[in-house]
Image (cartoon, helix red, strand yellow):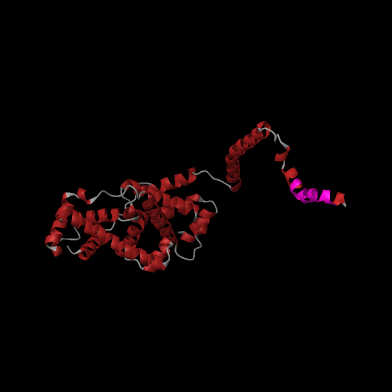
Amino acid sequence: MNLAQLQRKLIAAARANPPSQRVPYAFEKRILARIAARPIMDRWELWGRALLRAAAPCIAIMLLLGAWALFAPPPNTPTNDLSQQLEQTLLAAVDQDQPIDSAR
Amino acid sequence: MERTEAEMIAAVLKGDTASFEPLVEKYSPRLFATARRYARHESEVEDIVQQVWLKAFEKLDSFRGEAPFEHWLMRVAIRTCYDSLRAHQRNREKPFSELTEPEEDWLDRYVSQPDAADENAEAARQLVERVLGLLSPPARLVITLQEIEGRSVKEISKLTGWSVPLVKVRAFRARAEMRRILARIGKEKYL
C-alpha cells in the first residue's frame, strides 16, 4: 500500500468536504445573554476574595502556633539555653587561662 | 448608516454590550466551520464557539485595530480549538478495528485500484476524520491548517503563536505521525 498516496488522497478528501457553516438558531442572542449574565468583577473584589480564602489557613496556623507556644514544655536544663552555650564557648579560653594568671 | 466594525468595537469597549451582537452574527458561521474541523462531536462545536466569543469579549481591549478584527478573532478561535483538543486528548477516537463498512470498502478499493478510490466519497471523508482524530493535538492542528486549509507556515505561526521553526518541526512530525497511523491501518487490516 502506497502510504504517501493514501495520505494525499485523504487530505484531498478533507479538502473536498469543507465543514458546514451552519449556526444554531438565535445563537448570537445566547452569546449576548451569557455575556450579560457574567458576574462583573473589579480588582478590589478579586483582592477581597483572595484575602478571604487566605484567612482560614492563616487562622489555623496561628492557632497551632499559639497552642504549641502554650503547651510545649519549657527547656528544663540550662545547657539548652543557646545564649548560655554561646557564652560558655566564647569564655572557655579565658576560663582555662585564669589559673595560670592567678599563679603569677 | 451602517456602523463600521471599529465603531462597534469602540462602543462595546465603552460598555454598550449590544454592539457586540452584529459581530457575533457576522463571524459565527466562520467560527462554526473552524470549530467543526477540530471537534469530535457536534455538541462540542457549540461549546467551543461559545468559548471563543466569551474570550473575544473579555480580551476585546487587547485588539489594537492594526489587523482586521477577523484575523484577531481567528487567532482566538484557533487557540481555543487547540485547548479543546488538548483537553480531550485522553478520549480520542477509537482504533481502526472499528472501521465502518463503507470505510473498509473504500480502503479495499484503494488497495486494489488506488486511482478508483474517489476522494469525494463520504467514506473517504469519514476515514480522514478518523485518522485526524487519532493524531496528537499539535499534529492535528498543523495538518488541518497547512494541508487541509492550505495556510503558509507564517500564517500558522501567527495563528497559533508558535515560532516559524516550531511550526516547521511540528508539520514534519505531524506528517510522519499521520503516515504511522496509516501504516497501522495497513498492518491491522491487510497483514
Is residue B178 shown left or right of residue B7?
left
Nearer to the camera, B117 or A72: A72
Residue B157 position by quadrant: bottom left
Write the start and end of the magenta stretch as one range.
A88-100
Q: Residue at x 34, y 61 (%)?
A: B142
Is residue B28 shown left or right of residue B110?
right
Q: Residue furthest left?
A: B112
**Residue A49 at least partly seen:** yes
Residue B77 position by quadrant: bottom left
Is residue B107 shown left or right of residue B175?
left
Is residue B18 shown left or right of residue B100?
right
Q: Main secondary structure of the magenta part?
A: helix
Above or below, comparing residue B79 to residue B168 in the picture: above
**Residue A14 at least partly seen:** no
Residue B7 location in percent, x, y? 50, 59
Q: Residue at x 72, y 41 (%)?
A: A81
Q: Residue at x 66, y 31 (%)?
A: A71
Q: Residue furthest top?
A: A71
Residue B119 location in percent, x, y? 19, 61
Nearer to the camera, A99 or A15: A99
Residue B104 location in percent, x, y? 16, 53
**Residue A94 belongs to magenta span:** yes
